[in-house]
Amino acid sequence: MFSHLRLKEKRLAKKLSQTQLADLLKINRSSYHSWESGRAKPNQKHLTDLALIFDVPETYFESEYPIVTSFLQLNDANKRLAEGYVDDLLQKQQDADSQIVPLYPVDVLDAIALSAGPGQSLADEYEKCTVYASQKPHGYDIATWIKGTSMSPKYRDGEVALIAESGFDYDGAVYALVWNDQTYIKKLYKLADGFRMVSINKTGNPDRFIACDDDFRIVGKVVGHFMPVKGE
C-alpha cells in the first residue's frame, strides 16, 4: 500500500519543497499535494519517476517496505522464526478482537427511581446520566433506575428499567406508575373499582389496592431491563 508518509519523509530529507518536486515530476503542485495528504496516490509512471529522483526502488514508497526489506535480509532459519512470531501476534490480535463487546449508551433519568418498594417523588425536571448496555435496547421511551428488592429476582436493585409510554395494556404486565406522588415498578391487575399492585417477591410485600379516585397514573409498560456495564 502506498505510504504518503514515506514520500513526505523522503522529500524533506532531500530538502525539496512540494513545488520543486512537482516541477521535477512535470505535474502541478495540487496534484502532488494530494499524494502527500493521502487523498490520492501516484500512478505507475509517477512512482517510477519518484524512484529515479530519490534513487530508491519503486517499492520504497510502500508502507510494508521496511518490514519486507528487513525480512529478506534474514537467513532461512530466522525467516521461519519471524514467520512464527508474526503468526503468534496475529492470533493474539484476533483473539483479543473477538473478546471486544460493543456497548450501547442509554440516557437514564437520574432524579427518578422506579421503586420496588416505597418510591421517590416524580419531579417535573430531572438530570440524566449515561450508562452502557451490552445489548442494544429497542422499543422504549424512558429509562430509569430500579430501587429495592420487591420485584426480584427478575428485576434487581440497581438495574435500569426501559419503559414504553402507554396506558394499561393487560393484567400481569409490569408497569411504571405514580401513586400518591410516589413512583413504583409493579405488576398491575385491573379490578372493577381500581387496580391491584403486586410484587414478584412476596416476602414482606403484600398486594396493595389502588382505588379509581386515588392520585394515580401509569407512566408506561416496562419492556426491558438491564444491569449497566461497569467500566474498569
Image (spheres, helix red, strand yellow):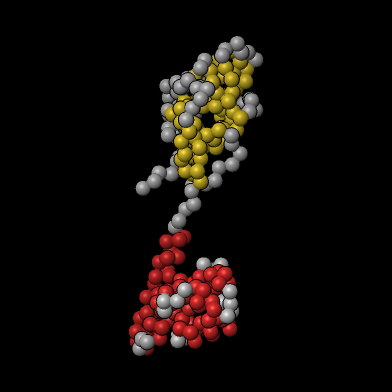
3 up-or-down from 71: above or below? above
Location of residue 154 in the rendering, given as x and y in whole percent from the top left corner:
48, 35
Location of residue 88 in the rendering, given as x and y in whole percent from the top left corner:
39, 72
Q: Residue at x 60, y 11 (%)?
A: 213
Location of residue 218 in the rendering, given as x and y in whole percent from the top left corner:
59, 23
Q: Residue at x 57, y 12 (%)?
A: 214
Q: Which residue is more in the foreground, 63 or 173?
A: 63
Location of residue 27 in the rendering, given as x and y in whole percent from the top left corner:
58, 77
Q: Residue at x 49, y 31 (%)?
A: 109
Residue 169 appears anywhere in the view: yes
* Number of disc labels: 0
Residue at the far bottom: name it.
75
Q: Which residue is more in the foreground, 180 or 207?
A: 180
23 up-or-down from 216: above or below? below
Residue at the far top: name it.
213
**Dividing the picture into quarters, in which one does residue 216 lie?**
top right
Residue 2 appears anywhere in the view: no
Q: Which residue is more in the foreground, 216 or 123?
A: 123
Q: Residue at x 47, y 53 (%)?
A: 101
132 up-or-down from 26: above or below? above
Q: Which residue is more in the foreground, 183 or 51?
A: 51
Q: Would residue 173 appear left or right of 203 to someone viewing this image?
A: right
